[in-house]
Amino acid sequence: MTGSITNIAVIDYDMGNLHSACKGLETAGAKTSVTDQAAELLQADAVVLPGVGSFDPAMQHLQERGLVPIIKEVIASGKPFLGICLGMQILFEGSEEGQENGLGIFPGVIKRFQSEPNLTIPHMGWNQLEYTQPDLPLWQKLPVDPWVYFVHSYYVEPADSTLTAATVTHGSQTVTAAIARDNVMAVQFHPEKSSEAGLQMLANFVTFVQQQTLVSAA
């Protein structure tokens, strides 16, 4: 999209290092703003919800800042939306990790990995994705089964299995590693920590945003 700047708002709610995600998006040519202001989120070309930490504090921080209805409005508007790690989990109804209700954008719950002999919890380090939506814009120009970086003890179990865009296997358990539907994409792993594959995903998201902006302007 020559001559235009892609503006991506990164939601600020005190849950993790937001600037590492910004850096990856900026490397791909986007202009980012870290904000909790409704006007900025609604005016941006796209919104990113990152997050590390626990489910309940995340939801409490979003509630305290009045961001729950804003996030729902952003998603309902069709604006491109990317959730990262905890930012994917809170899109669902609730979690075994806590008591708070999630955003409820999608039906499903967050579950803890079941203990197994020799299984490390949290699932931490590099692991391979297996695509279940291979044509997803986020996967463009990536190798088959790319290695990405995870840090999590809980995983998303969507009520609708067609939401799942990629899986990962830890021990004997194969779980959802990414979801996608319409304008919403979200990943359990950290693309900003996933070397070239992760940077390509962030670049792919920027490209997707640019394409959607062109369509909206047409």
Image (cartoon, rainbow, N blue to C red):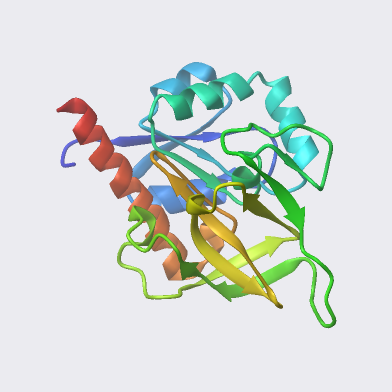
Q: Is residue 92 visible?
A: yes
Give coordinates of residue 155: x percent, y percent.
Answer: 68, 56
Q: Is residue 190 left or right of residue 181?
A: right
Compared to 96, does 149 lie above or below? below
Residue found at x 79% / y 37%: 56
Give whichever of 63, 34 is nearer the camera: 63
Quarter-wise, where is residue 61 in the image?
top right
Give coordinates of residue 194: x percent, y percent.
Answer: 52, 66
Quarter-wise, where is residue 79 in the image?
top left
Compared to 121, does 16 lie above or below? above
Q: Report how many numbered discs are placed on residues in the image.
A: 0
Residue found at x 56% / y 63%: 193
Q: Is residue 160 left or right of residue 172?
A: left
Compared to 138, does 67 lie above or below? above
Q: Is residue 46 left or right of residue 128?
A: left
Q: Residue furthest bottom?
A: 118
Q: Is residue 41 visible?
A: no
Name the quadrant of the C terminus.
top left
Give coordinates of residue 49: x percent, y percent.
Answer: 56, 39
Residue found at x 59% / y 74%: 127
Give coordinates of residue 44: x percent, y percent.
Answer: 39, 28
Residue found at x 39% / y 22%: 43
Name the quadrant of the N terminus.
top left
